[in-house]
Image (spheres, grey):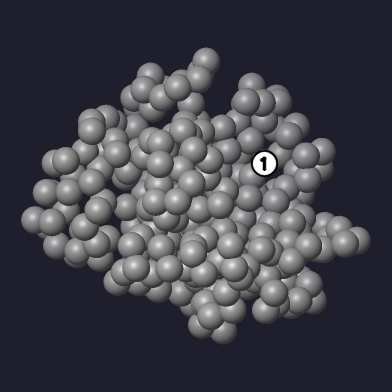
Amino acid sequence: MSKSTDYEPIDLIVISLAREINDSESCYTGIAIPSAVVAVQLARMTHAPNLQFFYGGYWINPDLDVDLFTIMTDTEAFVESISKAQGFSHLVQLYQYWEGPKHTLSFGIIRPAQIDQFGNINNSVIGDPHHPKFRFPGGAAAGDIINTCSRVIAYVPRHDVRTFVPEVDFITGRGSSPKWRKDVGLTDYQGIKTVVTDLAILEFHPSSGKMCVRSIHEFSTIDEVQENTGFDLEIPKDIPTTRAPTKEELDILQSKADPLSIRNFDSRNR
C-alpha cells in the first residue's frame, strides 16, 4: 500500500481509530460523535467486515450504507436506516447480548471534553459541579461503556490544555488506574486504552496507569504534544511516528465511508 501526504488531521484521526478495530469484534458508539461512526464504517469496509455494531444504545448493525449526514439530519432517512437494523436492544441488555464469558462488548469509542493523566473523563460540567461555569450535554452511556467494554478508545479532535487536564472537574467515567480497577473487581475491563488526537496517539502505562505517548504524527513534534498537555506525559526514549494514511484508506474514507465529510464536524483548527 502506498503512503499519502494529501490528508487532513481529522482524516488521520478517523483512520487511526479504524486501525484500532479488529474483525469479528463488537463495539458501541454514540450517535453524535461523527468520527467514531465514520471509523466504524471505514473498518467494516476494509479489514473488519464482521464487526458487530451497537449504535446509539439501541440498534444492532443498522444500515449505514446511505450517507451519514442524511441519517443525522433527516428524520425519515434516520428511521428508514434504523428500521433495517438486525436487531434492537437497550443499554441494560449489554450484559446479556454480547459474546464472551461476561458478555462484554469488545470496545467502545468516546469523545471526552476533559481527560486527565489517569484516563478519567468529564463530559458533564466545567468548574464546581454545584455552580458550574459550563454544562455539557452529559455523559450519556460513557460512564457505563468505560466499565462494560473490554477496552475503550477515545478521540480528541484538538489536543490542548483545556482538554488534557491534571484533574478533571467532574468524573463522568472512571479512568485506567490498575489499582482502582482491581479493588472494585474490574480487572477484565481496561478502561480507556488509547487516545487518538490531532497531534499524537496516547496510551496508559500498565503499572502506573498514567498517560504516555505511543506515537506522534508526522506533522507534529513531541514538544508540541507536551506543550498542549496540562500534565507531564510519560515519553519513551524512541518515539515512533504514527503510520500515515495509505492512498487506499483515504480513497475508501472519502468516496465510500464518508463521502459528505461529516467527520469535518469534529475538525478543530489550530
Please give left or right for residue 47 compared with residue 41 in the image. Answer: right
Point out the residue furthest to the left here. 76
Q: Is residue 162 visible?
A: no
| Residue 91 x, y percent position in the rendering | 34, 32
Residue at 23%, 31% in the rendered image: 87
Which image quarter: residue 156? Answer: bottom right
Observer-nearest of 123 and 135: 123
User: Looking at this rendering, what residue extends furthest in the top direction?
Assistant: 101
- Which residue is pictured at 52% across the width and 45% down the height? 21
Q: Residue furthest bottom?
A: 270
Q: Nearer the viewer, residue 53 or 138?
A: 53
Q: Is residue 268 above or below residue 107?
A: below
Of 11 and 136, the residue lying toward us: 11
Q: Secondary structure at mark 1?
A: loop
- Measured as percent of width and height from the top left, residue 52 is found at 38, 35
Number of marks in picture: 1
Q: Residue at x 27, y 60 (%)?
A: 68
Q: Look at the picture and state if 65 lies above or below 86.
A: below
Quarter the N terminus occupies = bottom right
Residue 173 vs 75, above or below: the answer is: above
Q: Which residue is mark 1?
A: 176
The quadrant of the image that shows the C terminus is bottom right
- Residue drawn at x 31%, y 45% as measured from the top left: 56
Q: Quadrant of residue 223?
A: bottom right
Q: Position of residue 153 (x, y in %)?
A: 55, 48
| Residue type marked 1 | Ser
The single residue placed furthest to the right in the displayed view is: 237
Rate crowding at label 1 as few (under 14), some (14 to 19) or many (20 or more) other CA atoms within 10 Å: many
Relative side of 221 to 185, left or right: right
Name the image quarter holding residue 75: bottom left
Image coordinates for residue 250, horizontal then vertical, percent: 47, 68
Asked if residue 253 shows in the view, the reply is yes
